[in-house]
Every structure is written in structure tokens, then in C-alpha cells.
Amino acid sequence: MNKIAKLFVTFISAITLALVSFTSSFAKVEGEYIVLGSAISLTGKYSSNGVHTQNGYNMAVDRINKMGGVEVQGKKYKFEIIYYDDESNPKRAAQLAERLIKQDGVHYMLGPYSSGLTKAIAPVTEKYKIPMVEANGASRSLFTKGYKYLFAVLSPANQYLEVAIDLAVEKNGGKGVRIAQAFEQDAFSQDVRLGILDAAKRTGSEIIIDDKLPKELNDMAATLAKVKATKPDVLVVSGHTKGALTAIRQISEMKVDVPMLAMTHCDAAKLSKQHGKKSEYALCASQWHKNLSYKDKFFGGGKKYARDFQKEFGYDPPYQSAESSAALLVFKDAFERANSFDRDAVRDALVDTEMQTFYGNIKFGPGGQNIAKPMILFQVRCKGDDCENRVVAPTKWASDKFYHPIPKWSERS
Amino acid sequence: MDFLIFKAPMLMVQASLDGILLGILFALIAYGMALQWGVMNIINIAQGDLVILGGYIAYTIYLWGIHPAWGVIISPIIMFFVGWALYKLVINKVVDRDLFISILATFGIAIVFQQLMNFIFGADVVVAQSEYGTTMLFDNSVTLPNSKIFSAFISVLYAVALVIYMKKSRLGRAIRATAQNARAAKILGVDTEKVYAATFGINAALCGIAGALISITLTLHPYVGLPYTVRSFMIVIVAGLGNLPAVAVSGMGLGLFEEFADYILGTEFRIGAVFMLLVLILVYRRFKLSKKREYLK
């Protein structure tokens, strides 16, 4: 190697070294910015909800920064987020979490979208003792592993449809009901199923059909034919957006009459828009609805949040965006109470969180799940061809009465 | 194990009809695969993704306010050119290589198509509404969505038309000649390059029809192509190449098998049962082959 080449190599190495040391110091807090990191699905199969999540985060960052930021030890700081696209791939998400922590020096993380990806990232944040506030991983298994640095602002998956069974039992005069259920075979849906099994046991209800739908399946005709033959009191379906859309399509085509139909992912599937009147009376579990009366000083209430979000991004906020915004409010509150950037101090402050946001009350249980916020149920109701989701439970926030039983298809116009 | 189906005979009728209607649709996709497999010796892993792309074309015209059923005419026309272009850009580079290279190439195409569809149409699951209503049989105890009946009818119609075309037309004869012996066909003046491009185009067009039918009977999502590839692969394995009646029977048989497996073994074993059947058939074929008298030339 000649002299010039050697010099060149030395020069490049020096620059690389300088850059590496610079990026590692570009940690946690840089100047007036508190830097958070998030691997998020901007491409791949979760990209729609990934974008909803990112919009929720960005909206909250802007709002908090505009309203004075975060005050720690008498100094005002602003939030900034480093994003990487995890391509909806758990392995990639775990790699990116590692990169955020080790290369970018991030000390505080925001969660990705979906239970599966949160599950992939949680061991990494746990290993490096990085507090992560997540808003889109509801699977119960996330909260039973003894993670100490994971905090979820949302209710766990097993609570999604428990209320629906209680409602059905109430309508049945307090007696147990006959339940038919079909759940996709993924972590989230199976957790929803466990919740139903608990509720059935608690209320003395009987499960007469218990189908597990393969991930690839987009035909539920066999399950629905069984439902037709056995006439249950409640039909419960959870299979993400595909499950919700397939169920409504085939229930309406096969004219399956059930007194009550409870589902998940109705709003993510845009059920009332895609299926219109066919989706009427479907009961849907949701983490949040704009009509709830929770308030905070950053976003006001749910309706104001929805208006501002619509103005900024051009569409109504799904609950994925609302809960993501709430995650930032939780972080701000924890930093201010910890009055420090020490990770463990922030983590301890997160443990003691007890606050109300526009999204709901937040208090973390021993597993990191939010135990202060109930799930809500809305029912799709239509006026002519115009359908919307109306909150029917819990009664405190109900804007409409729960319509039960669902009229038979032969009686529906 | 659940034997509900044996207790309620109407469920048996429902399962059979559902299975047959679904099977006919699978058979159409499988026919395209068998055709290009036979002619070009290429296993197209992107088959299911071509189907979904065809579905999105129908869905797009539905968004424009046109009835999605028109998709069964518009989608194959567009897809034919997509297939032709795909051949010219990628497939003709691998058509003379071994089977493994073609599997890799089409696997790559599948990934590119998935990402493109995700980029253009978004990652939401979508459906097109045909509003065809429902046919009720046996005092309303058996219900058949008219959209499924329509899709089976269209599939049969196109399959028959294609058989006639393959028998009577000049291009059809050229395709069959190339499938039998490409070198001989070339010597006799058949432009095999054109035949290959047309075959790939016809396969893509068949996928386009199936996709349009799926948009009104099932659901569309950029990443749900693979199950259609697997099913058509399986139908072709059972039926053999270049044998349309066998593809039709095998398609319907698979549809029936899936439905009954769902009722008897449980929904969670539906796809598993299909794979089990595939293994059994392959073992049986191997066994039959080994019994054949072998001799040295």
C-alpha cells in the first residue's frame, strides 16, 4: 500500500471513529431535545396501522413541544423521535431496537405497532434497561413475562370482548348464554379468546362452537353454517381486519341470524364504510372513542382531539392514533415527576403513573398493562345508507342504547 | 373431532356446494399454472400475487363506480399485458434454465408485486360489493351467495372458451405444439418466444379473472396471494399437466376436501389437512412409479 492510500485509510478511520463517538453521545438528551426511538411499520402488512401510530406520536410531539415541552430540573426540553421502518417484520424490529439503543444511543423507546412486534422488541429494551411506553401491543403474554421496563397505555387483549359476554348475560336475564366463537390463530386473537373463556366460566355460559381460523383463511362459510345449525345466543369473531370483513360479508350472504354479534377491529376494517348496512348491529370492542368524556390540558377531550387530528392528517383518528398520542403524554408526565434523565428514575416514575389523558385514565399494573381504563363497546348503527359507530357500553359513556336482539335478515330492509 | 355434519344432513349439502363452488375457482387458477408449467416448465410462485393484482384491478373499477363484475372482462385484458411484459422483462431470461432458477425468479416477482400492491393500494383489507343477493334452498337451511354461483359460472365459461381456443386457434395449436416438443415446434416454424410470452400472458389473464371473482366473493389484501399459489400447485400436482378435465375435478375435489376437513377435523386443521393430502398423493405417486417395469434403453 502506498503512502497516500495509507493516509487515506487513516483519515477515513478517524472520521468513522469520530462519527461513532458523536452518535453515541447523541443519546437520550441532546441540547434541548429528549430523543425517543421507535421502530415502526411504515411498509409491509401493518403499514396502515403503522402510519396511524406514527401520526399519533407526531401529533403529540408537536402539541407538547408547542405547549412548553417537558420541564426537567427547571429547564424546558422538547421531544424528538428517531423512526426506523421495521417492514412489519419482528426480526427486523428487534434489530432496529438494538440499533436505536446501541448506535443512536436512545434511552427511551416508544412501542411499534402490533403485539407481535412489541413481543420482538420487549426483550431488547429489557436487556438494555430502556423504558418503553407502548400503545399498540395488547397481547396478555406481554404482561406476564415479568418485564420491568415495558408500559402499555392500552387495555390487554383478554379484556376486549369480556364486556360483550356480560352484556349478553344481562340481556338473558342473568342466565348463562350459548356462545359460538371463531378466532384467528395469532397471539392477539387467542388472548381475546382466553378472555371469553374466562367470562363464560364466570357467567355460567356454554361455548358450543370454538373454531380457530388459520391466518391464511378468508372463507368462514363452514363456521357460519355450523352457527346457523346450532343457533347460539352470541357469535364472537376476532381475526383482525380480514376476519371482521370476511365475517360480515359471509354472515350477510349466508343470512346467518344471531341475536348478538361481537367483533374486534371493526374501525380498523372501516366496516361501516366497506359493508354499509350489512354491518349494522355488529358490536365492536374498541380501546377508545372520540365521544368519551376524558380530558387533559394538551388535547382537551376526545372530540377536540379528533377535530385536530382530522385537520392535520385528513382523516378521523382510529384508536391506534389516540393511544399512540397518549404514550407521549405518559412519557412527559414521567420525566417531569422523575425530574431527571436517569433511566431508572424515569422507569420508577412510570411505575407510579396515575393520570387522566383525553384517551383515558392511565395507571400501570404489575405487568405493565394499563389497569385504569375499561374497554368500550360500540355498535354499528345506520340511518339510510349512512352508518356510524355508537358507544353502547359502558353505560357511563353510552350515547345510544344497545340494540338487542339483532333483527332477522328476513326482517331487515 | 366434530361430527355435527353427520347429525345435520343439510350441513352436508351446504358443505358440498360451498366446496364445489370454491373448488371451481381454484381450478381456474390452477389451469393457468398447469398451462405455463407444461409449456415453459416454470413453476410460478407469483401465481397467487397475480390473482390478487387482478382482484385489485376489479376493486379499482368498483371504486370508480363501475360494477365489479365488469372486472372479469377488464382485469384479464390488463393482466394479459402485465403477464406479457413480465415474460419479456424477467421470465425469458430464466426460461431455459433449470426449475430452481425459475422458482427463485418468480419468488422475487411475488415479493415485488406484494410490495407494489401495498404501495399503490395500501395495506388495508378491502372488498368489492356485488349486491347479488343469496339463493336459499331447502326451506332456507342451505344458503348460497349468488356471487359464488356467478364466480363458478364465469370460471367454467372461461375455462371452456380457453379449451376451444387452444384446440381451434393457430396460437392455441402453437402453444400445444411447443408444450409437446419445443425444439421440433421451432424447427417447424413456430415462434416459440412469442408462444412463451402469450402463454405467460394467458396465465396472467386467467389469474386476472380469478382475482376479479375473489374481489366480490372473498377479501383482498396485498399479502394473501400465497394460499392461492399453494392450492393451485397442489391441484396441478394431483391432476398432472395439460389435462383440463383432471384439473377441474381435482379443483372441486380439493374444495370439497377442505370443507369437510373443516367440519370434521376443525377449522384449525383445514389447511393442515390439505398439506397432508399433498404428502399422501406424492408418496402414492412415487410408489406407483416404482412399481412400473423399468428397462434400459
Image: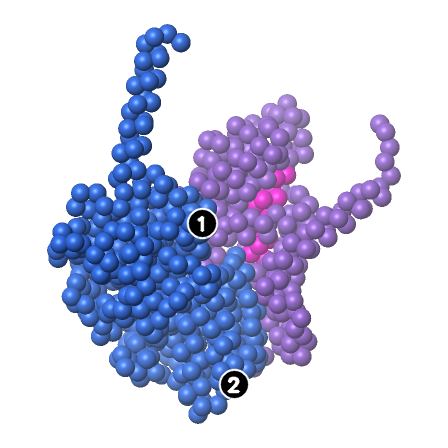
Determine whether A59 is above or below A248 in the image.
above
Residue type at tag 2: Gly
Q: Is residue B177 visible?
A: yes
Left or right of B288, for residue B269 = left
Chain of the residue that carries numbered disc 2 in the rendered image: A
**Residue shown at 59% from the left, 63% from the top:** B268
Q: Amino acid at mark 1?
A: Pro
Residue drawn where x is 41% and y is 88% of the image: A171
Subunit of label 1 = A
Query: In this figure, which residue is indicated by the disc labeled 2?
Result: A204
For residue A90, which numbered disc appears in the image? 1
Q: Is residue B115 above or below residue A162?
A: above
Can you say whether A15 is above or below A148 in the image?
above
According to the rendering, which colour does chain B have? purple
Asked if residue B31 lies in the magenta stretch, the reply is yes
User: For chain A, what colour was chosen?
Assistant: blue
> What residue span does the magenta drawing correspond to?
B24-38
Relative to residue A410, is residue A26 drawn left or right?
left
Name the residue located 47 percent from the left edge and 36 percent from the top edge: B86
Question: In what element is the residue under mark 1?
Answer: helix
Residue farthest toward the bottom in the current orientation of the protein = A173
Residue A347 is situated, as x and y percent measured from the top left of the image, at 32, 57
